[in-house]
Amino acid sequence: MSAVQPRIEVRDLVVKYGDATAVDGIGFDIAPGELVTLLGPSGCGKTTTLRSIAGLENPSSGTIRLNGQTVWSNTERRNVPTEKRGVSMVFQSYAIWPHMTVFENVAYGLRVRKAPQSEVASNVTRVLEMVQMHGYADRPSSNLSGGQQQRVAVARAIAFSPNVLLFDEPLSNLDAKLRAEMRVELRELQRRLDITSVYVTHDQEEALAISDRVIVMSKGKIEQIGSPEEIYNRPASLFVADFVGAANMIAGTVKGPSQDGNLLFETAGGVTLEIEPPHHGRGGNTVALRSSYIHLAPTLGAHNKIAGTIHRRMFHGDFIQYVVDSPAGQLIVRRPPTESYAEGSSVDVSFLPTHCILL
Amino acid sequence: MRSQGIEKWIAPLLLLFCGVLVLYPLVYLVTESLNIGDAQTFPPEEMGIGNYTELFEEPKVIFNTLWVAGFATVLAVTFGFIQAWILTRTAIPGRARLERLMQLPYYMTPLIGALSWGVLLGPKTGLVNQVWRSLGFTSDFFNIYSPWGIAWVMALFEGTVAFVMISASMKSMDPSLEESSRVLGASKLRTALRITLPMVAPGVLSATIFVFAEMLGSFAAAFVLGIPGRFFVVTTSIWEATLSFPPDYGRAAAMGLSLSGAMVLTLGAAKFIMRKGSYATISGKAFRPRPMEIGPMRWMLMAIAWGYIIVSVMLPLMALTLTSFERFATVIVSQMQFTFDNYQTAMAMGSLAPAFANSLTLGVVVATLGVPTIGVLAWIIYRSRMPARGAMEFLIMVPQAVPRLVFGLGLLWAWINIPIPIYGTLWLLGIAYFTVFMPLGLRTIAGVVMQVDKSLEECARVCGAAWTYQMRTITLPLLRPGLIAAWLLIFIASVRELGVSVFLMGPNSKVVAPAIVNSWLSSSSELSAAMALMQTAMVFIAVAVLFRVARRVGGDVV
């Protein structure tokens, strides 16, 4: 990232509401064309961070730069108003203006910029086609469905070719099926326009699916920044392991090195596991183990093998979730629907050391 | 940001402006209430609490007030509860229309109510009493010039207020609360007693207290129906104290402030109960509880529901109409003499035609200047992050806690003592109206401001619009229905204003409501009826427009 000038730079950002600190000294860079997700539970400061980039919040300290230009800095006493930042935003509530038609909504940003009439018309038509709403231009916007409002909101946000596109939980008001569809479409559109995007969501699945990189936040601080795979496979903290994906937390203590360069970890239940040395430096006394990485049949190369009994079986369709009683404690295990075991049957629980993350 | 620069200057200026408007008269009122020397001098030469202790030497007035207000409250809440139950919980035909009509009694005003019931039930000459006597009875059917009569007229008016509050608490109750009681095996009756009643009780209780507080400060009915029989409540004795010679402003101010104090305490209690006792019923969501199917009973309930509208609106208006076209008010057909003279006189009399013109002018001007001012205030209070927003809201809402009559007294005393010669002119009336209607305007506009999602405005900024452009293209168009409603409500309130006007009206600045009262007390009821109808017509035209606006935006602005 050093070669290319970052499109967005956030440094030591602090946002306070009275006594409460919403964002507590965070910083990150976003490269041109990148889609970065701010992921975290409600109240973690992700939306506040996004709104600070847009200029809709006044931070207490820190610096925000867009295209190398400082748009907010308390030391330089700079605060570029929202409308001059050249960013665009899709709001959680869509914020479709009910007193305008679909066309007028989408044309707003172009008209503000005094674009000639012909350019307004051609641009609006182009973006409405992109979001598959071209038949709706003259409709009043007050009686569109949720999904249609969402598309209009996106069209309006991209119509005036902004530098940066901000998404504030744009899919949270849609039903599950439509959400999955729109996720694909949004990613498609973002790649096609090659537009730098910051995307806020509390849905970890959505964050993993859509992003180039994910920033996991908790209590106003950044827990981890990384690609979706890094976040999932190498969580840097208990919080990330717990919040992203389904994981088992096994308590115990490190007993020393094993023969092939791994560590030996003795669980509270007295089982010794072989685990990989920690990647993030510090080793605690918990091992996080993803539910999907546990096998219930003997596997080649798996150093960790424990006998277990199926306690409960829940069929989810795309996978089966088992609660397995084992000497290492109760484990949640997800297997494809082809691997079916009855409740009460004995299984051979096995998993790789590399999937045991010491935290 | 540029907008912040504007906001930075506007807010303190507006705060100062409103502060002066509201506090200046109140300061005078407080000072005067402590004046025990010569009531005519300012600042007072002697200060003390004598005016307050004197109030308790004459407990009769306090007793009268409590008993009229108490009885009227019981009546009003009974009316309100029955109407609310019928209109929200039973399946009577024509429910939607009835619910809309339920707003009408509020626009009748206690003054028009008192006049028309005076026409109907005045001793000997009242239309109903005439019929009663012609049937061979030797005494009146009912004498409206009595505490009972005052309470009756006030109850018909406040009944709608109770209705609105109680039906709101009935509507906000999640029907699944009752349904789950039925599912768990409770009977209809048990459900009503154990679930419905406790859920609705806080709403009813706070409506009761609220209505009682309003009754304490009400003036018109006690004025029209109490003065002739020398029956005084607190408000009318304040009025009387200022008329005595020399005017006892100190005593009047002490009475007025005590009354405000009592009202603030009572209203505070109502608010407290509403917040404490309202369980989860007030979720901000409106439910439409499934109305009960009540079979043939529905015709009776429908008759009851219509009965309230008829008694509180139609009957009084018919009585006024009949009287206004007669030479002498009568229902005996053989004696009827119809004429347009009353209307001609009303329009021709030296002081009356200008009163109508003045009221209309004041209504238009106050509403037109008030709406933008209050609109900016509402936007600052409910949208901006400006410091002292809470203080601003509190300050603007203060006039609501002071009875109009008392506020009028403060304004009178305040502006007499200022070298700017506006006492007795329309200017002072205009300033006074603006001050006392600020709470009304703020509440109406605030309702709409809060309905407009903040992100609608933010989105405009993100799209590149500067503050002024955003205001012009997004905020104002979205607020338009609310602003129109506020304009109409302020206009209506101005045209029918009585409490403040009685003190501030001068010989060259007469307005309608006090003029009607004067005519009623000094000349004929036929002429007064004509004037009252003309005022009601102005109000109802504005109400009709208001309903139009309200229906077009699909919201309930009033």
Image (spheres, helix red, strand yellow):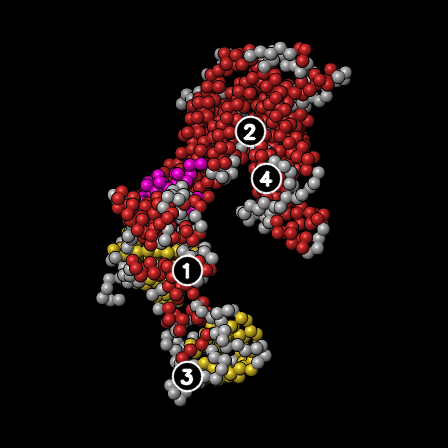
Q: Say which label, 4 or 2, has the lower sequence index.
A: 2
Tell me the element at label 3.
Answer: strand
Badge 4 and badge 2 both on one subunit: yes
> Which residue, given by chain and number where applicable, does mark 1 sit on?
A181
- Label 1 resides on the chain identified as A
Tell me the element at label 1.
Answer: helix
- Which numbered disc covers residue B107? 2
Name which residue lies at 65% across and 50% down. B178
Tell me the element at label 2.
Answer: helix
* Image: magenta residue range: B452-481
Quick check: marks 4 and 2 in contact, CB under 8 Å? no
Quick check: marks 3 and 1 in contact, CB under 8 Å? no
Q: Residues within 10 Å of mark 1 (few under 14, many from 20)?
A: few
Residue B214 in the image: above or below residue B113? below
Name which residue lies at 29% across and 58% down. A193
Q: Is residue A277 visible?
A: yes
Residue B59 in the image: above or below residue B447? above
Query: Which kind of residue does numbered mark 2 sit on?
Result: Tyr
Badge 2 and badge 3 both on one subunit: no
> Which residue, given by chain and number where applicable, does mark 3 sit on?
A263
Name which residue lies at 51% across and 33% down. B547
Q: Position of residue A89 (x, y in %)?
A: 35, 53
> Which residue, given by chain and number where applicable, does mark 4 sit on?
B165
Query: Which kind of residue does numbered mark 1 sit on?
Result: Glu
